[in-house]
Image (cartoon, helix red, strand yellow):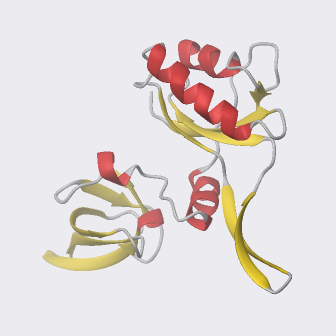
Amino acid sequence: MEKQWYVVNTYSGHENKVKEKLEMRAESMDMQEYIYRVIVPEQTEVEVKDGVQKEKKKKMFPGYVLVEMVMSDEAWYVVRNTPGVTGFIGSSGKGAKPTPLQPYEVDHILNSMGISRLDVDKELTEGTKVKIIAGPFTGMFGTIEEIDLPNQKIMLSVDLFGQETSVEVELSQIEKA
């Protein structure tokens, strides 16, 4: 089983409480192996009021939270029964497991927040083998040489026509091999 991203429906205005409760429940019920990250998609907007500029966090999808998890019966039960959660998006109900988000959908949401789908700190280090899933080098495998987090780029060493070559790709264009 691999971890994927799911959309959880919450009571509107309770997104941060659900995030907090879900993270606490994952820890207290020893589910960190199944429930990884809980994110409330937000964007920062600049608001000008009475000539004063103020930054304001605005929810991208009010009433929804993204959860990166391995869909097991136990993890599904923990998320579904977290106070404030009304269900999963992509589930027909009646005990059916939900459909995960596609990687490109997750990348779009997380990139707009300045976050990567891959948990860079835990999953990617220099020397890690990765597969390129988008761009001119699609389908090729490479080894990470350097990670540039602020610019969301990675330098990879790939075998190009029998010769090791360094190429730069965006973080959203790779997945762990």
Relative vertical location of residue 176 with respect to residue 143 in this rendering, above or below: above
Where residue 65 sits in the image (x, y, percent)?
69, 41
Q: In this view, does 127 lie to the left or right of 14?
A: left
Relative vertical location of residue 28 with respect to residue 46 in this rendering, above or below: above
Residue nearer the viewer, 61 or 53: 53
The answer to which image quadrant residue 175 occupies is bottom left
Residue nearer the viewer, 42 or 90: 42
Q: Is residue 31 left or right of residue 126?
A: right
Relative vertical location of residue 42 with respect to residue 53 in this rendering, above or below: above
Residue at the extreme bottom of the image, as rendered? 51
**Residue in view at x 67 percent, y 39 percent:** 16
Where residue 150 sits in the image (x, y, percent)?
40, 72
> Is any atom of residue 167 visible in this view?
yes
> Is any atom of residue 161 visible in this view?
no
**Residue in view at x 70 percent, y 29 percent:** 98
**Residue in view at x 49 percent, y 53 percent:** 117
